[in-house]
Amino acid sequence: MGLPIRSCIACRKRENQIDLLRVVRSGGRVLPDPTKQMNGRGAWLHPHCVEMAINRRAFERALKSEEILDISEVLKFVEGSSN
């Protein structure tokens, strides 16, 4: 049996889940879940697709939020992991 396949919420491309970052909604914030074990509603995206996800309001749609979510923790995580 192969690795689980997930879709990026921004570009919609399907990938092995190890190639995607899982994010979780916690209240009005979106948190990175690099261990893929946090409780809560989650979504998957390529780290390089964060800006596209912001522009398309993909976080709110995928995480079923009617309010604008704070994604600052995800941005810090992605910027830190690219260095």
Image (spheres, rainbow, N blue to C red):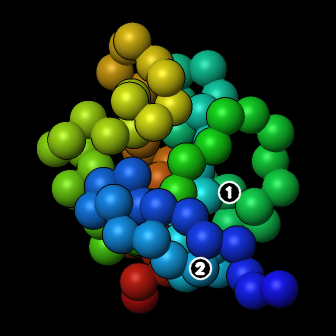
- Taking the image as shown, residue 4 lies to the left or right of residue 44, namely right
The residue lying toward the viewer, choosing from 79 and 38, is 38
Residue 44: horizontal and vertical position, in percent? 52, 57
Residue 9: horizontal and vertical position, in percent? 39, 52
Residue 50: horizontal and vertical position, in percent? 32, 59
Residue lying farthest to the front in this orientation: 1
Residue lying farthest to the left in this orientation: 55
Image quarter in which the C terminus is found: bottom left
Q: Which residue is mark 1?
A: 33
> Which of the 4 image quarters holds residue 35?
bottom right
Q: Secondary structure at mark 2?
A: strand
Image quarter in which the N terminus is found: bottom right
Residue found at x 56% / y 64%? 6
Is residue 57 shown above or below 44?
A: above
User: Residue 49, can we see it?
Assistant: yes
Residue found at x 28% / y 50%? 53
Is residue 61 shown above or below 35?
A: above
Q: Which residue is mark 2?
A: 16
Q: Which mark is residue 69?
A: none
Residue 67: horizontal and vertical position, in percent? 37, 13
**Considering only order in the chain, which callout, 1 or 2, is on the residue closer to the N terminus?**
2
Calculate the distance from the C-alpha at mark 2 to the C-alpha at mark 1: 16 Å
The residue lying toward the viewer, choosing from 41 and 7, is 7
Q: Nearer the viewer, mark 2 or mark 1?
A: 2
